[in-house]
Image (tube, rainbow, N blue to C red):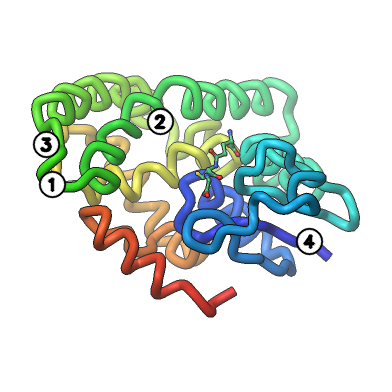
Amino acid sequence: MLEVWGRKNSSNVVPVMWAIGELGLKHVRHNAGGSFGGLDTEEYGKMNPNCLVPTIRDNGFALWESQAIIRHLANAYGLGTLKPEDPQQIAIADQWMEWSSGTAIPSYFPVFWGLVRTEPEQRDMKAVEAQAIKAGQTLKIADNRLGDVPFLAGDTLTMADLPLGAAMYRYFNLDIERPSLPNIEAWYKRLCDRPAYQEHVMNPFGGSPAEWASCEKAMHGID
Ligand SMILES: N[C@@H](CCC(=O)N[C@@H](CS)C(=O)NCC(=O)O)C(=O)O
């Protein structure tokens, strides 16, 4: 049995759940982190010494770090789907995962944090706007790539698309100026057509800390 620990609105849990959905894996998810707590117990610390989410246990095998989890699921259950078969395609998929988590998401994340996770009266809108411009510039790199191929690693959806694809739902639903990114927009529309994306990524997150908390509250009692 595959078990996942993590609240479903966590930006690092979302791509893991999306991977599980794409692969159609039977699983149990335990709400943890945020207002659900549960990360500071001895038992949880043994599975994940960072006391963060997500963590999985796959038939007794515990693993943390969302990208490592996505790669494990793709290796174990997604050869030829989420995990390309050709070594060069695998390397390209890895490249876009690394770029997404190391470059693109860090450029967009302060915008999300500066709006959704910051009280309106404490927001530094100049910094948010400046960062939104930087994020847009960075995303042009993926936009160029997606002008050549429909998905980041080639013709079909792979693990390459998951980290950035998950972040794009929030990017496109934040109240910010965005540059024209026609190829990312077309890719994002393709992702929005996927049932697993609809179920695991397209969930309300609100536009302020109060709205975020009320979206999270609505999840209590739902595992
Ligand atoms: N690099 C880690 C980061 C994990 C992380 O920062 N998780 C955050 C949620 S996105 C967390 O557990 N925060 C504490 C909490 O949710 O209570 C990963 O990708 O899994």
Q: Which mark is residue 120?
A: 1
Tell me which residue sits at (66%, 50%) in the image: 40
In 3D space, how far apart are the residues under numbered discs 1 and 4 (Cα atoms)? 40 Å
Residue type highlighted by circle 4: Leu
Where residue 130 appears, as percent x and y from the top left, is: 15, 22
Q: CA distance from mark 3 to mark 4?
A: 40 Å
Check contact, mark 1 vs mark 4: CB within 8 A.
no
Question: Disc 2 marks which residue?
Answer: 105
Mark 2 to mark 3 CA distance (whole Å) = 17 Å
**Mark 3: few/some/many CA within 10 Å (<14, 14-19, 20+):** few
Q: Within 8 Å of ligand 1, the CB of disc 4?
A: no
Decide: few, some or many residues near mark 2? Use Cα within 10 Å; few <14, some 14-19, many ≥20: many
Please state, as top left, top right, bottom left or bottom right, where the N terminus lies in the image. bottom right
Q: Which residue is mark 4?
A: 2
Verify CB contact (< 8 Å) between mark 3 and mark 4: no
Indicate the secondary structure of the residue bearing disc 3: loop
> Dot 1, crowdedness within 10 Å: few (<14), some or many (≥20)?
some
Vertical order, 103 against 122 (above or below):
above
Q: Earlier in the sequence, mark 1 or mark 2?
A: 2
Q: CB of mark 4 within 8 Å of CB of mark 2?
A: no
Report the amino acid beneath label 3: Glu
Q: Is residue 212 above or below residue 182?
A: below
**Badge 1 or badge 3: first in the primary sequence:** 1
Give the side of residue 147 with respect to residue 199, left or right.
left
Inspect this view and state whether residue 179 appears. no
Select label 1 or label 4 by which is in front: 1
The mark that comes first in sequence, 4 or 2, is 4
